[in-house]
Image: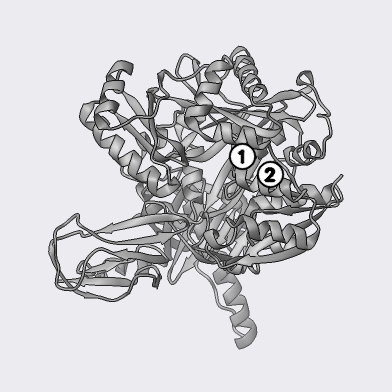
Amino acid sequence: MFDKILIANRGEIACRVIKSARNMGIKTVAVYSDADRGALHVRMADEAVHIGPAASAQSYLLKDKILQACLDTGAQAVHPGYGFLSENSGFCQSLAAAGITFIGPNTHAIEAMGDKITSKKLADEAGVNTIPGCTDVIRDGEHAVKIANEIGYPVMLKATAGGGGKGMRMARNDDECRDGFERAGNEARSSFGDDRIFIEKFIEDPRHIEIQIMADSHGNTIYLNERECSLQRRHQKVIEEAPSPFLDAKTRKKMGAQAVALAKAVNYESAGTVEFIVDKQRNFYFLEMNTRLQVEHPVTELITGIDLVELMIRVADGEKLPIAQADVGINGWAIESRVYAEDPFRNFLPSTGRLVYYRPPEEDKHVRVDTGVYEGGEVSMYYDPMIAKLITYGANREEATAHMRTALDRFLIRGVSSNLSFLSALMVHPRFVDGNMSTNMIGEEYPDGFHPADLPHEDPATFITVAAAMLRGHRDRAAQIDGQLSGHERLVPEDWVVVMDDQHHPVSVVPVEGGHDVHYNGSTYAVRSKWEFGQHLFDGSINGKKVFVQVERNEQTYRLLHGGSQADVWILTPRAAELLKYMPVKTAPDMSKYLLSPMPGLLVSVAVKEGDAVNAGDELAVVEAMKMENTLYAERDGIVASIHFKTGASLAVGDKIMELE
């Protein structure tokens, strides 16, 4: 077995690989850029090698620097994780030439499956169901229209070298087809340096279901069941689960057999994933094969009890698979939520900065957290915005979902925005609860983006009674301290008013052993907790039912978060509540004449100059953050009065890029 391996990656996946290697007694080498000097994966590894500036093109994507790091440290093998160089055949060849093992598939498999046209032809030859379409490269817009009419609308135009939702356009008529060909080609050219496009039939209301396979170098290939990955936003997975709530045993077996057949056709070794599109009748069609470890691999590990990273390392070292297909079962249910540093209420714009407070839920047999950050660390604008993967396990789907809802309530992140509220809202959405999902679900349910009004609303009594109990506990403590200092006992009133959503809710709060009894709306709520002022999590119970409520203090209000719901509350005396209507409302300043940076990032380009006339909808600038370019447009007609930043400048949220008059 290898003595030392290098992880050619960063973040949570690098930490994940280090854990398995450590359990196997293998030493690890981390690589890091300037931005990752203090990163968690660097702290966890036995050794760490600096490989360049923050930009991934100057560090994590440089094959020669990583190869040199292997030679300098004596690493005998490289695990690539996912992304970066994980599916780069040139990197594999460089390692092989230096006598270093690549912990992944062979070069032939990577190249064959990395090209969508080649992979589809190989799938056809291997007897794998493929989507009707044309695998020949489309010459131009008119050729695209001709092929689309032969297949029948709707169709999907795809970049042959595409991935991550880039280089894809759906068309329902000739005009959309011509336009889609141009746009998909342009996007593919800028993203992958390859503008080849092919066309296939677009499957209406599809589900995205993938099969995990594992193969060794001795001819043994097995499939480890499926993962449901239909909950996506802009072609990016948000929540995954295993098994799928949609598949039956017969379909699972057919999909698994075809995935194995495709793997054998390219002499596949190591872990890989064959992705399928599945229609309402459980007809399934090959989409692509990912020749690497997937982000969502933990859900497979939890229902099979198999450490996929360990198996990858053992297979790379020449060992045979320790299990056969008959040994693979399904034990329980697992769900994964991808926790990102992004603001769901601002069109999911990435959020960067320091993690002032970072407390994931405690791990146990029902909760697993794969993370690459720590409290006090920084979320950089240079890389993917993933903070962590939160995975829960239960005997069935209902139990796994319940654990996920509780775990999301307990996940504390401060300093950067996160998508926790969005994930919580999805967990209680009727379509998710019923398993009635498709890749279109998020777009259909939130066509105009995600807004506070979209948050699910539970019984308001949860927020009202918890807020009242917190306030009374804080006031009692303050009165006790004041009495000790002054020698005079100060009584705290029982009657208060909780103001929420502009509604006034009178309550009476009585201290009792272990908490408070809150009298509200004709009922008594037994609120029990040891919460103290300043704590970010209310950990307690209401009428004997366990409840976790996140608490954010903001001047005179509390912001409470629970079960995907969010509420801003004031707790006032009855007299103060009565006078509240006379309080003046502060008017926000008019910033409409400025182009403000909506996120921290780099100013990639400025499309105008001072004195230019612009119309509403014209491109003004492009800001790059976390590997994504965001084009900023004029919201109104005007003249560019001044430009405050030059191309290449680092921007903070709200920075005034330019002024229009």
Q: Residue at x 74, y 51 (%)?
A: 98
Query: Which residue is denoted by mark 1 in the rendering?
Result: 294
Q: Position of residue 251 (x, y in %)?
A: 58, 15
Residue in front for this viewpoint, 518 or 547: 547
Q: Earlier in the sequence, mark 2 or mark 1?
A: 1
Dot 1 alpha-carbon crowd within 10 angstroms: few under 14, some 14 to 19, many 20 or more: some
Residue type of the residue flagged with mark 1: Gln
Seen in the picture, residue 464 relative to 250 is either above or below; the reply is below
| Residue 621 shown left or right of residue 336 in the figure | left
Residue type of the residue flagged with mark 2: Val
Q: Residue at x 60, y 40 (%)?
A: 336
Which quadrant: the C terminus?
bottom left
Seen in the picture, residue 126 relative to 526 is either above or below; the reply is above
Identify the image quadrant of residue 182: top left
Provide the secondary structure element on which disc 2 rests: strand
Provide the secondary structure element on which disc 1 rests: loop
Dot 2 alpha-carbon crowd within 10 angstroms: few under 14, some 14 to 19, many 20 or more: many
Q: What is the number of the mark on residue 636?
A: none
